[in-house]
Image: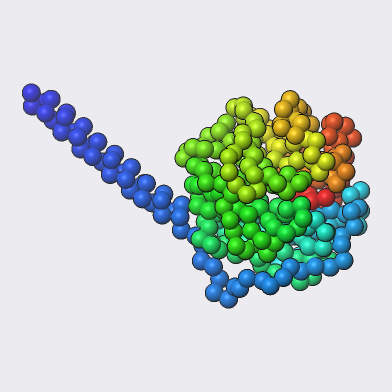
Amino acid sequence: MRTRHRVLLVLLVLCAFVVLAVGVAVVLLSRFAHVPAPVPAGWSAPASLPTSTPLPTTRFAFDSDRTGSFEIFTESTDGRAPAQLTRDDRYDSWSPRISPDRRTILFYRAPVGTHDRDQSVVSLWAVSAAGTGLVELRPAGLDGWVLQGHAEWSPDGASLVMFGGSRINPQIQVTDRLGQHPRSVTSRGGSNLDPSFTPDGKQILFVGCPHAVCTAQDYEIYRVASSGGAVQRLTTDELRDQDPAMSPDGSHLAWLTDFGGPGVGVWDVRIGDAQGRDPRRLFGDGGVTSRPEFSADSRSIFVHRVPPGGTKFDIYRIGVDGSGVTVVTAGQPGNNEYPSP
């Protein structure tokens, strides 16, 4: 009997310890998830966007670490005449997005060495297409958001869509063109990420995981009206899906999928009809590909990728039928990423 009592006592103590540990972990996680970065004391919301003469449609924007830190560049779509727009080695500047009128470029910044690996310290910036008038639109922590990222223009250039919110429950947000006055489009459990507008601006595509704890296969592509409301799920599989984008003519939906494998895995672009049906892989190899962006004529997709056996990212262009693969930044130094045609 004494032995049994001792065993029961030990079990009770262990159970109490586990409950206490779980409670402490929940409290710490909750605080960690909901404490935003401090907004710089001297920051104020901008009154206007920087603009210049429009960037020609024969040029695209991208980021590159060829100078040491990541900076924003533009160059010809055939890989010629690169021009550097930003110069500040205190930061990594990345993920440029050209405005519909091609006069302004959005991009993100993070402390140098961070790049795109920590969405809690990134800030949203804008610069003219000529590289002038640099302005910070959204510092980290603004509006109480712990995370922010993936800003995209509306087709008319009047607003932006992005994700923002707590670490464990970010939502899809629409702001004005200056990144201010956010409005939540979604109010769902789990993570809501990677938004983009449909070509008519009436709907928003995004990646969602409805669970508090998400595994790779939980991330699927969804669609919601730009004004909010009911959410429609477009993909149903056990693969991690990211970065949905619709072609300007509305005929195709492309997105990124993780097909598993060692290390960072095998990532490829899949493309289907406007509903995401009957998807097919574009590259079909063992490379690592990221974030598809359609050309203005809807015939091609731009990505950055590391091919099988490669050692750095370069900008690729590929036809929507999988033909005509071109390494746009072939022979150029450094990693070259996040194209915006």
**Quadrant of image for the N terminus:** top left
Q: Residue at x 28, y 40 (%)?
A: 19
Q: Compared to 314, does 133 lie above or below?
A: below
The one of 229 and 106 positioned closer to us in this rendering: 229
Q: Nearer the viewer, residue 99 or 96?
A: 99
Outermost residue to the left: 1
The percent position of residue 146, horizontal first and vertical second, equals 52, 56
**Could you say which quadrant of the image residue 316 lies in?**
top right
Report if residue 58 is visible in the image. yes
* Residue 5, horizontal then vertical, whole percent: 11, 28
| 164 with respect to 84 (left or right) | left
Q: Residue at x 33, y 42 (%)?
A: 22
Image x and y of residue 222, in percent: 63, 37
Q: Quadrant of residue 255?
A: top right
Compared with 54, 206 (above or below) is above
User: Which corner quadrant of the image does residue 285 belong to?
Assistant: top right
